[in-house]
Image: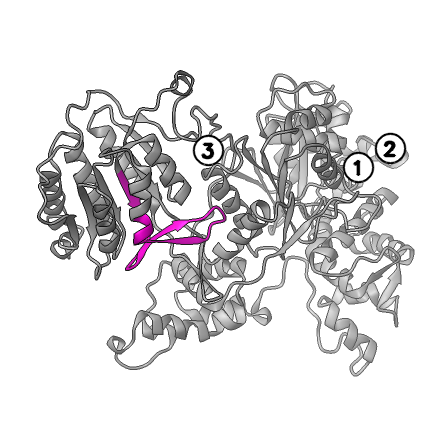
Amino acid sequence: HGFRSPASDEHGLTMEEAKAGKSKPYDLVYLASCPLISKDMGKVYTVTPLDLRAEQKALQKIVQESRKRLRFKRDFATVQRLSTNLMLGCRVIHYTGHGLPNGLAFEDEYGIMHIVPTETLRDLISAGAKENQVKLVFVAACHSEPAGRAFVEAGVKHVIAVKITEKVADKGARRFMSHFYLALSMGRTVKDAFKIASVNVMAADNLPTGGDEAKKYLLLPKDADHDVQIFPGLQEGSMDDCTAALAMENLPASVDQFLGRNYDVQRIIEIFLKQRKRLVTIVGERGIGKTAVAIEVGKYLLHRGQFKDGVFYFSFEDEDRWDKEDVAISIAEGMKLNIPTNRVKNQLKSYLRGKEILLILDGLDSMAAVRGKKNSSPIVSLITELLRDCAPLKILATCCKVVGVTKGLEEREFPLKTMQDDQICTLFAKLTGEAFTPDKVGMVGDPILYSSREVLDELAKHDIITKIIRGHPGRCWEAARMYKKLNTLDAVVKQMSPEQKKLPRGYTPIEPDDFPQYDKFWENLKLEIHDAEALRFWEVFKPRLKVPWEDFKARLAQHFHAYTKTRRPLDQEDILAICQFIQRIAKRSGERYDHKEVSARAFGIWWKRWYIPFTSTVKQIRNVWDRKLVMGVAYSKQSIESEIINDPVGSFMLRLSGNNPGCVVMGFVGTDQPKRVLHVLIETGPGPNGEFKVNFNDGKYQTYNSIEELILQCKRVTILHPGFVKDSVFGSGMQHNSMHRQAEEEDDGPS
């Protein structure tokens, strides 16, 4: 998505036309209705989405291929926008959306379906249109015959609609529309264009029921003279697209198969627009769909012009050590603002003040503070300042917990829950690409006896839905990927069952005789900790299930030294950083924060997710770790940059990643101008000496047997800070006799 600046006003007039006071009638106005939900008798229903993008693309392609200077405008079908376009003037109105026997489905400003009765449609056309200016209305919707007759009663001479008893197929509708408008723009009459479109639908090779599809369309009034040109004498040239340009944006692409979250998207939109809240935080566990929902909210509001100064997306996943100025710089760069690097925060606030902008701040789990904490994180402090000083700015955040803004600002929490079984079944079927048959879901008997709905209902009862996925979109994606490999539901269930999961690298299984049986302490501890080595770690604390942080820190230092068999211990800064990771991981998993004690449950979660991959990697790079050639987890990206930014090109440092446990980060001075420090993630895996993988942002992974081999073969790095030629440090002999002695004698060896 490139950035686009508005080139026309809200009515679709170019700036020059608006200044000159001109208001030429549009030749063709395309009105699309795509509400998120409908409400009926107190119940909420998700509206089946239409493939508007494909239809708009097909229509625009046809108009361009005609090589006629036709004034074309795309808009959304709301009562206000219909009235506005009628008053500005238009020859043809094309409506696409859901049709009903008693009217058409429009949108309201909050994404809710607004059913406009046929009588109201008639009155809107009669009151709003200039005399005889609307020549033709094309109602591309199922059951739209009554709406079509309402347009006729309003004085429109030519109307195309669908029989009241019929639904139309998307492919057939696009084909009919394309050929109809191509013929019309080439100067053919309405009668001829209708016939050409009908014949092409009947002859379509990808529409087995093309003949039936063509008969669903009506040209109204039936006995009127339709041998009339709508676009006589159009000039040769390119299409004149009068559609209002989108505001500036940098939104990523929508997630594939976005399903089952329309109500959540609509509720957030309503919170922003109707309740006029300025900070909404989508909260929920990882993989529940927070990012996907946030992006869809941004796109819906962007395309409907609700934020005329822009909608911008920023991901802060696994970032936790920036200060406010760093965060401000990231936001300014993402918005393509030309702001000098000094005092960026204040200049960013000056730019945002008074502008209608939506900022989407995604993945604040690592950076957000707990509500009520005095020492809030940089991102929370910046959010607080922006909301306080930059009205009417609005912010949509995603986080496992509320962000926790202070100083009287209101934060609206929006919990994102698991999906309903029918929605998750549909998502699973779409992700697998499988048209599930009765035998696939365990049904017996003649497949002809079962409808597709009955098959999906049976799928909803299967263990893969009730025990494995359990309404969680992230697990649904994982199950779908596995199904493509295993090809049976039962095989996926067996593979993904908790008891069947393979132990991660470095995990130690608990044997029946390892620990005393029928001991209440060990029974309680095993409920929280599922690794034998972790139980031995905690054994010194018996009988406590919570211990003070100071006791835990001492035990951590002792265990690390013995478990990894390294000569270099953890320093106090690393121990403090590791304890912060325990707190953060525990909070993500719903554990209450306790600044005095660490619980066995929090420890068990951290051990599996963080400590095992961390210590496994330390063992693999033991020689590099002991010689202090790699920094600990207390070292941040910013720390590396401040150390080497003034060094020659090719200078580098290594550090163990805290946010990506088990990985090493290499920061090096690149060849870019102005000079900057680049960071690449080195992943570790199983292998004789550990398998080390690195991707230099070219989409290809390079694999090495050791970290020394990786560094020696990497042409981008030459000098280990503060001045060690890499060959002398990481070479075949690594000249490690003198270097090793120096590292042992000097406590601050090469860093």
Q: Look at the numbered disc 3 and give the secondary structure of its residue.
A: loop
Q: Residue at x 42, y 17 (%)?
A: 19
**Which label lies toward us, 3 or 2?**
3
Report x, y in % for residue 513.
75, 78
The residue singled out by tag 1 in the image is 628
* 219 to the left or right of 281: left
Answer with mark 2 or mark 1, whichever residue precedes in sequence: 1
Report x, y in % for residue 78.
40, 44
Mark number, residue 1:
3
**Residue type pointed to by label 1:** Lys
Q: Residue at x 67, y 37 (%)?
A: 665
The residue singled out by tag 2 in the image is 748
Local crowd size for mark 2, using a 10 Å CA cut-off: few (<14), some (14–19), many (≥20) = few
The span picked out in magenta is 93-121
Q: Look at the numbered disc 1 and give the secondary structure of its residue.
A: loop
Evaluate if marks 3 and 2 touch, with contact meaning CB atoms under 8 Å apart.
no
